[in-house]
Image: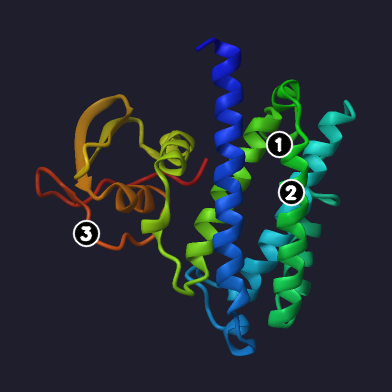
């Protein structure tokens, strides 16, 4: 397979995976009750309404980045910056369950249409987000949807994360490994990833549990070091 063909195949696989993630999120939100909106999520200090509002606001930001890139422009991730984003989340969080479901349905449908319209060259257009390219923005959206669907604590769990998601998330979170450490993730299904350089630390568990731990989430089953020592400390999200 040529480099161009491989890139197109990777883009298509990512779009398909995002469609599945949208469907999973949609099923979770469709069953949301009014009482559940205000209840705590798995994110400290945020209700489920905050998580849902964040996803809706992020969908607008992702759309903004991609549309600007296709127009040959660079714009800030959030219109009005982080303060405007935070204010919008606080304002939207108390919305009704129906309001959140409607907003997210429109947002995910819009992103689905937008991604389907991307030409091969569009994926490498520059964006302001991390001074990267459109592909980076799309990967970020995929990460956020999958992780926050679990954060809602409404029945979806990390066992639903695909190998594609795990691979991309581990690559993104590699900077969490502290300097002077080689972190080896060894999954029971044979999946292995090695991050960083330095003193070798091996952490074993199910693949999705290892990724959950690296992402700062509680794994469904224990993950353990091979030397019996406590799990290594991780740096903040990059």
State which tag comes first along the sequence, 2 or 1: 2
Q: How many marks?
A: 3
Relative to the observer, which residue lies in front, 126 or 118? 118
Residue at the (53%, 63%) spot, across then down: 149
**Disc number lying in front (2 or 1):** 2
Above-or-below relation of 80 to 167:
below
State which tag comes first along the sequence, 2 or 3: 2
Residue at the (22%, 53%) spot, across then down: 223
User: Left of 20 or right of it: where is 129?
Assistant: right
Q: Are marks 3 and 1 in contact (CB under 8 Å)?
A: no
Mark 3 highlights which residue? 222
Residue at the (50%, 65%) spot, across then down: 151
How far is the residue under mark 3 from the one under mark 1? 35 Å
Question: In x, y percent, where is residue 214?
Answer: 37, 47
Q: Are marks 2 and 1 in contact (CB under 8 Å)?
A: no
> Could you say whether the residue bearing mark 3 is in a helix, strand or loop?
loop
Mark 2 highlights which residue? 111
What is the quadrant of residue 77 in the picture? top right
Residue at the (57%, 84%) spot, across then down: 36
Mark 1 highlights which residue? 129
Relative to the observer, which residue lies in front, 123 or 88? 123
How far is the residue under mark 2 from the one under mark 1? 17 Å
Q: Looking at this rendering, what residue extends furthest in the top direction?
A: 2
Relative to the observer, which residue lies in front, 148 or 230? 148
User: Left of 56 or right of it: where is 214?
Assistant: left
């Amino acid at each position: 397979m040529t480099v161009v063909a491989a890139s197109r195949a990777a883009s298509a696989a990512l779009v398909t995976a995002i469609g599945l993630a949208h469907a999973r999120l949609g099923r979770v939100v469709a069953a949301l009750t009014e009482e559940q909106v205000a209840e705590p999520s798995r994110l400290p200090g945020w209700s489920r309404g905050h998580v849902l509002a964040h996803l809706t606001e992020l969908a607008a930001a992702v759309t903004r980045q991609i549309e600007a890139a296709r127009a040959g422009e660079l714009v800030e991730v959030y219109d009005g910056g982080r303060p405007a984003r935070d204010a919008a989340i606080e304002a939207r969080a108390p919305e009704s369950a129906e309001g959140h479901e409607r907003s997210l349905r429109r947002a995910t449908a819009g992103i689905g249409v937008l991604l389907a319209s991307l030409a091969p060259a569009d994926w490498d257009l520059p964006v302001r987000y991390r001074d990267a390219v459109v592909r980076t923005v799309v990967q970020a959206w995929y990460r956020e949807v999958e992780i926050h669907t679990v954060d809602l604590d409404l029945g979806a769990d990390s066992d639903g994360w695909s190998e594609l998601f795990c691979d991309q998330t581990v690559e993104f979170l590699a900077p969490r490994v502290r300097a002077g450490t080689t972190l080896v993730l060894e999954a029971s299904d044979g999946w292995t990833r090695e991050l960083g350089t330095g003193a070798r630390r091996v952490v074993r568990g199910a693949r999705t549990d290892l990724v959950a731990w690296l992402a700062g989430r509680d794994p469904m089953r224990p993950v353990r070091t091979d030397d019996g020592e406590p799990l290594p400390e991780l740096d903040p999200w990059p």
